Image: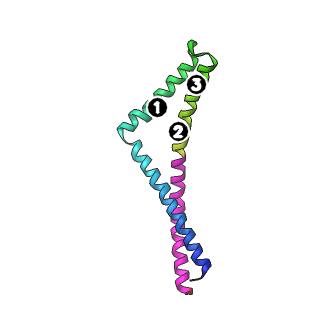
Amino acid sequence: MNTETQQDIAQIEITMEQAKMSIDKMEALIRLENHPDWKLIIGNGYFEKEAIRLVALKADVQMQGDNEQRDVLRQIDAIGSVREYLRSIYYFGRTSENSLAADRETHTELLNEDVTNG
């Protein structure tokens, strides 16, 4: 087995392992989101009811001071940050699903090429 092929095989194996970890993470998130407790606490609780409460609080007459407004905006931004983090898990998981199939094919080709040339 030549050194270049060995390096290519090692690199594709690392890439495949990373893809599998992204897919596992996405699948774990899907399982969590389907759990009734997740829906109660996070899905409906934090992402919906808490977001609505904070938007209403931002308009509250007693919350118009600079510190109060900053605090409410910080909490609204936190909700957005968590949602973006979860979206990134989906994005990388779906992307990894697509690339894993191609990586497996490349891996097989490299192994076959090495056997043929070796």
Q: Which residues are magenta?
A: 88-116
In the image: residue 40, left or right of residue 21: left
Question: Which residue is disc 2 drawn over?
Answer: 82
Question: How far is the residue under mark 3 from the one under mark 2?
Answer: 17 Å
Disc 1 marks a residue whose amino acid type is Tyr
Question: How far is the residue under mark 1 from the one under mark 3?
Answer: 16 Å
Residue in view at x 51 percent, y 43 percent: 86
Residue in view at x 57 percent, y 77 percent: 6
Q: Extreme right residue here?
A: 66
Question: Which residue is disc 1 drawn over?
Answer: 46
Q: Earlier in the sequence, mark 3 or mark 2?
A: 3
Say whether marks 3 and 2 touch (CB < 8 Å): no
**Of helix, strand and loop, which one carries label 2?**
helix
Say whether marks 2 and 1 touch (CB < 8 Å): yes
Looking at the rendering, in which quadrant would you find the N terminus? bottom right
Local packing at callout 2 (Cα closer than 10 Å; few below 14, some 14-19, many 20+) is few
Disc 2 marks a residue whose amino acid type is Val
**Of helix, strand and loop, which one carries label 1?**
helix
Disc 3 marks a residue whose amino acid type is Asp
